[in-house]
Every structure is written in C-alpha cells, then in structure tokens.
Amino acid sequence: MKDPQPAPAGSPGEGPDAPSPAADAAAEPAAYQFPTRKARRVAELTGLIPVVVPETTPAANLSGPPTPAGAVVPESAANALGVPAHAAKPVPAPAAPVPAQQAHEPKAKAPKPKSSKPKAPARQRPAVPVPAAPVPAVPVPAVPLPVGPVAAIPDEVSAGKPQRTPKAGRDLPAAVGVGVTLLVLVLGSLLFFPVAFVIVATAFSTVGVWEVSRAIARRGIKTPLTPVMIGALAMPASAYFAGSEGLLFALVATAGATLLWRSLDSEPGAVKSIVAGVFSLLWIPFLLSFVFLMLRGTTGPTLGLTPDLGNINPGVVEVVIMLILVVANDTFGYLVGVLFGKHPMAPQISPKKSWEGFAGSMGGATLVAIPATVFLLDQHWWVGLALAIGMVLAGTGGDFAESMVKRELGVKDMSNLLPGHGGVMDRLDSILFAAPVAYAIFSILGQL
C-alpha cells in the first residue's frame, strides 16, 4: 500500500482552509469512542478494536523513526508494545479522541483529498461482536426430582377422605363377627357333642402349630413338621380319652420322634430345628390338652350327644366358665383400654396394653366369675374370685408371651385366617396359659 502523492502548489488541497487527513480520519470512527482511556486500552488488548499507533508515539519506544498515524504496525512492534499478535493488523488509524462536548454536535464532512493514482479497494475488516454486559443471574431454588418411577396416587388420597384407623388397631365389626361365630361353634359343640368339640379344638391346635412353624421359618429354622403335626393330633385325643397319663406319654413319644426324625436328616441346623419342634409341641398342643383333662372330669369321656343340659357333666361347665372368663378378660380389657388407657404395661412388648385395661379386665372377670361359680358349680364365692384373678393373670401372660415371640420373629400376626383377629394363635394365646391355671384351681380349690 503506497502513501498518497502530495498535491501540487495552489491546488485546492493547500492552504489553511484545506481539509487535513487527520481531521477526516477523526470524523469517521465515532464507534471507537470510550469514556476512559482504561476502557479503550482493555478493548485494544482483548482484540475488540484494531491497534493503531498514535501520532505521539515517541521514537525511543521503537527501534526506528516515529511511525506516522495510519501506518501498518509490524508484529514485532506490536509485541514490544504489549499488544496481542492477532490484534496487530494493517488497519486505518482511528481518530483522535473527541472532546465530550463536541461528540454530540453534528459534524460536516470535509472533502477527501483527491489522489492522482487510483486507490486499491480497502480490505474491510469483519465486524467483531461486542459481548453484552453480564446480567446477574437470579437464583432459582432447585426442585428435587424424584428418584425412580413415580408411584400412583393411593385410592385413599385420591378419594380425599382418609380411612379411619381404629385406636386399638382392630377392625371392630369383623372382630366381633368372627368372635361370635367361634363362640357359637365352640359352645354348641361343647354343650351338645363333646367329641365334636375335641375335634374342633384339635384342628385349632394343628393350625396353630403350622402358624408357629411358618413364623419360625422366617429366621431360617426349619421345624420338622411331620412328627410335630402327629403330636398335635395325638396329645388332645390322649388327654381326653386316656387322662393325664396318656397326655404325658404322648408328649414324651412325640418329642422323641421329633429328635429321631431330625437326627436322620443330614441338613445343617439340626439342634435349632429340634428345639423349635419341641417348643411348638409344649406351647400349643400340650397346654391346650389341659382343657380336655377338665372336660373329661372324674367321670371319664363322653362319647355321645348330651341334649339334656340338666344332667350335664361338671367338666363341661368348668370349661365353659374358663372360656367365658377368657372372653371377658379380652372384652373388658379392650373396651376400658380404648376409652381410658394412658399408661402402657409393657411398651416394648405390647404397646397397646395399658394398666387401665388390665384393671378393666380384672373387674369384668370378677363380675362374671363369682356368680358363675356360685350358681353353676355350687362353689364358694372366693373360688370364683381366685378363678377370676388367675384367669386375668394367665390370659395377660399368654398375650405377652405371644407378643414376645412375634416381636422376636418379626411378624405382626401369625396369619390372617381370622379377619379382625389375625391368626388362630392370636385367639389361642390366652387360652393356652389359662387352661393349666383353671385346671389347677378347679382340682385344688374345688375339693375344699
């Protein structure tokens, strides 16, 4: 690129009124004005505007004569000035800074000096986009996203009315219905056909053994069901037809069969399996067999129908009173505990049993036991009182024992065969402990 030729003397380009190239250049790049020198320097260093050596650059800063305005700056000189290499390009020099008062005044364009030689078309530098000022971001709280698939809305929530949970944790209508049905079945067979009662009670015994064996299996302990089930069928029948000697023989024989059966099996865990089997035999069929010892009484087993209730066996009456007291213990304890229960008896074992409910059980059982023993068995009133206290203590102990076993095995109910009650064991738990106590009270105090 060559410098323009000087105009001849007397030409329009001479004289004080002639336009100067610097003035022309100063009027063009109005876009390169900056409020401060620091802002202009930052724009030059970042490459937003081309680097141009000003006219006042001293010669001492460069290794040569002063560089006129608008000249091309070599890369070496640009590096000596501390300018990035990519910014040192042959571009026309921008105008000198314009005072702030004149920046807003309209300026008249001065005619450009005519050159004798045609100029080469200037290379246009592409416009460099100026980044916008950063806008501070407004903090938006992050919404946690659900991990995994979103579950469907439960019917209770979508319906808008949550289901009411009973305070004592039972479905009361179902519990009452099942309880009345069992009471009619048991009392009907007991009063009119004792052998049928033995069959029904034996069936409950075997179901209870199955429930306990299944619950123990959750701990990885396999109960030998074959000998244990045979013992659950044999002990009630032996107690009713052969008395206490037959019950003891059936217990020993069944325990020995359980030991021998499991010893012949090569599967590991034989000791735990044998203990679980003997525990099931002692807890359910053995304790339940005291009911059949009371039922046979001193006259022996009754094989046929007993339609004449006036000549009923005293053993049948004793069993009926025991069952009524067990039901009274549960019913009065439940009602008083729901209404007034505030002080739990054993929160770690059975949180829903309260001392108020225990007092209700004691009072209700006493109100039932004394008239029953006086009018049905012709016994002293204190026999009924002792029987009431014994039944409440035994029934509550049976509930706690089953609660401890269920808590240890990690189950809420042994099964769900009886709606509102849970499993068969949830109904037998009180009877299993009450039967030996009632048998002892009737055998000892009834003879006085």
Image: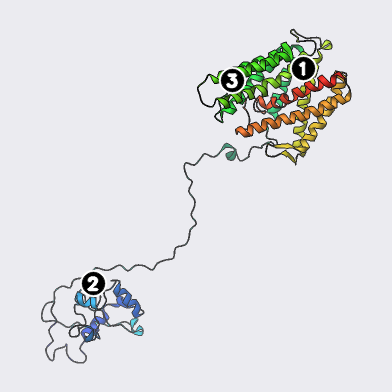
As drawn, 115 above or below 273: below
Q: Residue at x 25, y 82 (%)?
A: 54
In terms of secondary structure, where does tag 3 sit?
helix
> Label 2: which residue?
85
Q: Secondary structure at mark 1?
A: helix
User: Which residue is label 3 attached to?
Assistant: 259
Please name the amino acid that badge 1 sits on.
Met
10 Å crowding of disc 2: few (<14), some (14-19), many (20+): some
Pointer 1 or 3: first along the chain: 3
* Mark 2 vs 3, N-terminal side: 2
Q: Is residue 145 visible?
A: yes
Label 3 crowd bin: few (<14), some (14–19), many (20+), radius 10 Å: many
252 or 163: nearer the eye? 252
For badge 2, the amino acid type reads: Ala
Q: Nearer the viewer, mark 2 or mark 3?
A: 3
Q: CA distance from mark 2 to mark 3?
A: 97 Å
Picture quadrant where residue 438 is located: top right
- Number of the label disc, if any, that sits on residue 294: 1
Q: Position of residue 336 (x, y in %)?
A: 78, 35
Query: Mark 2 against mark 1, which lies toward the viewer?
Result: 1
Taking the image as shown, residue 14 lies to the left or right of residue 351, namely: left
